[in-house]
Image: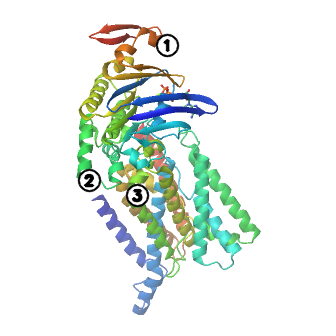
Amino acid sequence: MRIGVSLLTLTIMALASLFVGVIDLTQAEDAEIWPLIRDSRFPRTVATLLTGASLAIAGQIMQTIARNRFVEPMTAGTGQGAALGILLAVVLVPGAPLSLQMLLASGTALCSSLGFFALTRRLPPTQPLLVPLVGLIYGGVIGAAVTYLAYQVDMLQVIEIWMNGEFSGTLRGRYELLWLAGLAALLSYLVADQFSILGLGEQVSLNLGLNYRQIVLLGLIMISVVSGLTVVTVGMIPFVGLVVPNLISRVAGDNLRRALPLTAIAGAGLVLAADLLGRLVIHPFEMPAGTVIGIVGAAMFLWLLYGSRRLAG
Amino acid sequence: MIDIEGVSYRIGGQDILRDVSLQMGPGGVIALVGPNGAGKSTLLSLIARLNALQSGRITVNGLPVGQVADDRLARELAILPQDLTVTIRLTVRDLVGFGRYPYHKGRPSEADDALVTQALGNFDLQDLADRVLETLSGGQRQRAFVAMAYAQDTAYLLLDEPLNNLDIAASRALMARLRALAIEKGRTVVIVLHDINYAAAYADRIIALKGGMVIADGAPKQIVTEGLLRDVFETDAKVFRVDDRSVVLV
Ligand SMILES: Nc1ncnc2c1ncn2[C@@H]1O[C@H](COP(=O)(O)OP(=O)(O)OP(=O)(O)O)[C@@H](O)[C@H]1O
Ligand SMILES: [Mg+2]
């Protein structure tokens, strides 16, 4: 029921997205419409949906593994790690194909996620805010390293594209990698129970016969692949991985078998809405979806934080 | 049988367990007692491969702990750890349902669901089944975790202080349930208890641990004496015999 309603809403939004842009479809020549939709509007809509769904799921899995509600890949170093990988690929192999950029981005994203978990593993569980704080600093340090490196090789303007995500470049032939991110997110549904059990901690996981390290690694690989692919194709989009899982946890709990489909739909909806909004507010110009989400997401997150206090009190 | 042979354990140069050798089961309720820091939780965590062995050998039903596959052992032995912090929002039914994970690996059958429902009933959790764990009282949550270990349906059950937070009715009901498991199904239940009276009333055998060593081991009637309380806990408490049972006057 809940899923049905949210899917319907998402479909309506997706259809609307096909009609919004600089060129008004109702005024356009018939012959122009199909190529426009095929090459630009459809890829863009699909890109927002795939990005939103996979980032939200990656956030949910990262939070479950970290056993902390306030972390997400784009602020805790994974996204910055991905940007570092792309930069390395571009610098070391001039004219590197997208597939190589993606491979390196996912690899460095995985390294920096492993680093994050090694850093936060020993933090006292009684201080849950330390984990996101360390994550922010850690992500900031890697981000600074990326900026410094980019400055050295005179590519500051290029990295801007990856550091602030937006969808205007998602044309046919340039967004298809995102299907892989969607696939990675989909595969995580197959091991939803295993991820949920991770959330109960290492001892309970071991007791239930789970190969703890293997499943954690699997989760980190999934998060890194999603981060690498989205940063390569559209750039960093913050807050989706943070806000959506928190929201879904409120309404559906953390049994991932139930929560993940809702997380995917809500994440897709949020990014699609942000992109739509970005295309509409200063029409015919565009505001990057990453910026819109930065604003909307921050507001939502504050509301979640204070809302939870009210519920608890 | 749980066979522990010459197990020692050190953390940071400090001896936590010293050359412990024990055989437990098959069958029966075995109470593990001893002062805080004696090494009870450490011993259980080694048996349940939550920590890796440093020296010595442990087998559970012939399966060498540390070498046998994790999921194989999970169908032979379940542990309820002492520290049960939950950070995720799960319902009681979800939690108890995960007890069946070692069998269904993510695809629960009807038989699994039936066992979960039965476990919920056995620990008086039907009315709480759809509540989120974080909204429960300490004792209710403790019962939910015990029900999860129970749903795991293993020949060996290790429980680290399961009576934490339980009221007297729930405590007695749990102990009676564990006894029934041992008698009717031949299960081996190893349970860490701080209340010697519960140990004396419900256990077939009491093992006392102190400073990482086994210093007493036997039937409650022989073990629970004023001398033992002095040796193990360094406290002077009177012990009486009531209804052929030793009772510590606290
Ligand atoms: N991670 C650790 N680092 C250092 N010392 C530890 C660690 N874990 C346990 N210990 C020490 O090992 C000893 C045994 O601990 P253990 O938890 O097994 O005791 P216990 O018998 O279960 O006590 P309690 O009745 O309080 O639960 C204690 O002295 C404890 O301080
Ligand atoms: Mg203990």
Residue B89 in view: no
Foreground of the two, A253 or B74: B74
Labels 3, 2: front one = 2
Foreground of the two, A27 or A129: A129
Q: Residue B11 sits in which quadrant?
A: top right
Q: Position of residue B32 (x, y in %)?
A: 42, 25
Which of the two discs, 2 and 1, labels the residue nearer the N terminus? 2
Q: Which residue is mark 3?
A: A191
Q: CA separation, marks 3 and 2?
A: 17 Å
Q: Left or right of B125: which side holds A279?
A: right
Looking at mark 2, is its residue's CB closer than 8 Å to ligand 2?
no
Q: Which residue is mark 2?
A: B109
The chain under label 2 reads B
Q: Left or right of A232: which side holds B63?
A: left
Q: Is there a contact, CB below 8 Å, between mark 2 and mark 1?
A: no
Residue type at mark 3 is Val
Mark 2 Cα within 10 Å, few/some/many (few <14, many 20+)?
Answer: few
Q: Left or right of B110: which side holds B213?
A: right
What is the secondary structure assignment of the residue under circle 3? loop
Mark 1 Cα within 10 Å, few/some/many (few <14, many 20+)?
Answer: some
Mark 3 Cα within 10 Å, few/some/many (few <14, many 20+)?
Answer: some
**Mark 3 and mark 1 on one chain:** no
